[in-house]
Amino acid sequence: MKTRRILIVALLLLGALPVSVAQTYSPNVITTTVPFLTNAFDARGTALGFGGVATSPDAFSMFYNPAKYAFMKNDHTMIASGFNAINFVVPDQYALFDAFAQKIGRSAIAATARYQQSNDVTLIDAFGQIMGYYNPQEFAIDLAYSRRFGDYLSAGLAGRFIYSGLTVESLGYSAKSYSVACDVSAYYQRPLGSLVDLSAGAAITNIGTKMTYVTSEDQKGFIPTTLRLGTAFKFNFHPKNTLTLNVEFNKLLVPTPPIIELNGNGYPCYNEDGTYKIKYGYDNNVSVLRGMFQSFYDAPGYALNKMGEYERVGSFYEEMCEINTGIGLEYNLADHFFVRTGYYHVPSLKGGVNCLTEGVGMYFGIFGMDLSYSWYIFNRTGVVTNSQFAATSRLRWDMYFAF
């Protein structure tokens, strides 16, 4: 009976996922510096609909929820490495990453390093104006400490150094930028009877200083501070067969760009102090802390329709569209073979990405390997319609040793 109730709750969670309604609005996308920090590098998490804040701990828990490290198996050491072919269509885009984690009693320490090289990326200022295109080479180094409190709860704290170097060919210069950031997180897991295990997680990642590639203070941009909330149900159908369902929500804690007043020629209007005139929304040139709180209420609530006119969509609706959703299923056969699938959704008003994911894992003794494949369908025209979408794919693999 208890298992039946858990299944009903899981189905209700799935039913509560946001559904994308056909629209013809230009997306009002939130942009940040160093977007590579939002890329899930590991094969397991990406195969589960980019979810990992509430799943069982592994070497790559740093990205989702560092607090999970404290629930690693007793005295485990994990060493992992992986490769991410970001896009098969565009050459010279790839990522490398390594991870280390060590259990020490009721505590754990972990470290990760990520490196990414990409082709042309659009450089946009704090108000969404295009400044040029750049070629980034970026990396981040992370250190984390987590500790268990009792049998069911743990908390984690992580620190991060971020480097980004780019060449802006259209502006004729090269630049470097640095930032430091931290993560705070919590993880909870406990059995609900003999057949079902519940876990839940919460994390705020990349709380850090702004970055800029120019000397002007007005051009500083937010790094992708992200709130993640999720839960997972593990169904123990058989001592050697389990099925885990995870549901996860994430939101950028970064101010939404306001809609700028334009003159008759389509150029931005300025105030007497040289700042842009805001037509709808709030000024997003604010401090990091204020921006985190402002991100919950600052959506302009207006969007360009197919006639090129601003139409009210509602601030609350736009705020809800800033929540991305991921769901995943993982089947475990005797802790040796894993089959995974998932789905990730970004609402149309914020970019319109729908991603199907799948993957497999094989673990034998101290050695393990994961492979995942992600199929993206996204808006390619800047206007959200039913027929103007393009697709791309990503392949990830990683291997690790646990002993």
Image: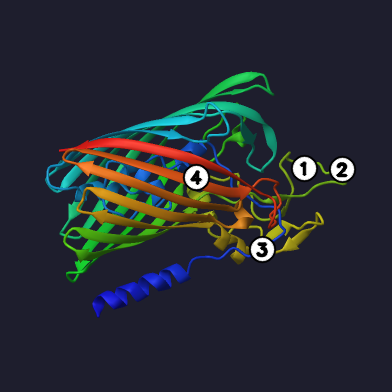
**Nearest to N terminus: mark 4 or mark 2:** 2
At 66% from the left and 58% from the top, the residue drawn is 300
Residue under numbered circle 3:
22
- Measure how far apart labels 1 and 4 are at the Cα level: 24 Å
Colour mode of the rendering: rainbow
Point out the frontmost of discs 3 and 2.
Answer: 3
Give the image location of residue 312, x and y in percent: 72, 64
Residue under numbered circle 4:
288
**Nearest to N terminus: mark 1 or mark 4:** 1
Q: Badge 3 local density, few (<14 within 10 Å), some, or many (20+)?
A: few
Q: Secondary structure at mark 2?
A: loop
Quadrant housing residue 234: bottom left
Name the residue type under label 4. Answer: Val
Image quadrant containing the C terminus:
top left
Q: Secondary structure at mark 3?
A: loop
Name the residue type under label 1. Answer: Tyr
Image quadrant containing the N terminus:
bottom left
Q: Secondary structure at mark 1?
A: loop
- Measure how far apart labels 4 and 3 are at the Cα level: 34 Å
**Nearest to N terminus: mark 2 or mark 1:** 2
- Point out which mark residue 265 bears: 2
**Nearest to N terminus: mark 3 or mark 2:** 3
Is 188 located above or below residue 68 in the figure? below
Point out the frontmost of discs 4 and 3.
Answer: 3
Give the image location of residue 25, x and y in percent: 71, 57
Quadrant housing residue 4: bottom left
Name the residue type under label 3. Answer: Ala
Residue under numbered circle 1:
270
Q: Is residue 225 left or right of residue 259?
A: left
Name the residue type under label 2. Answer: Asn
Of the pair 256 and 23, the residue shown nearer to us: 23
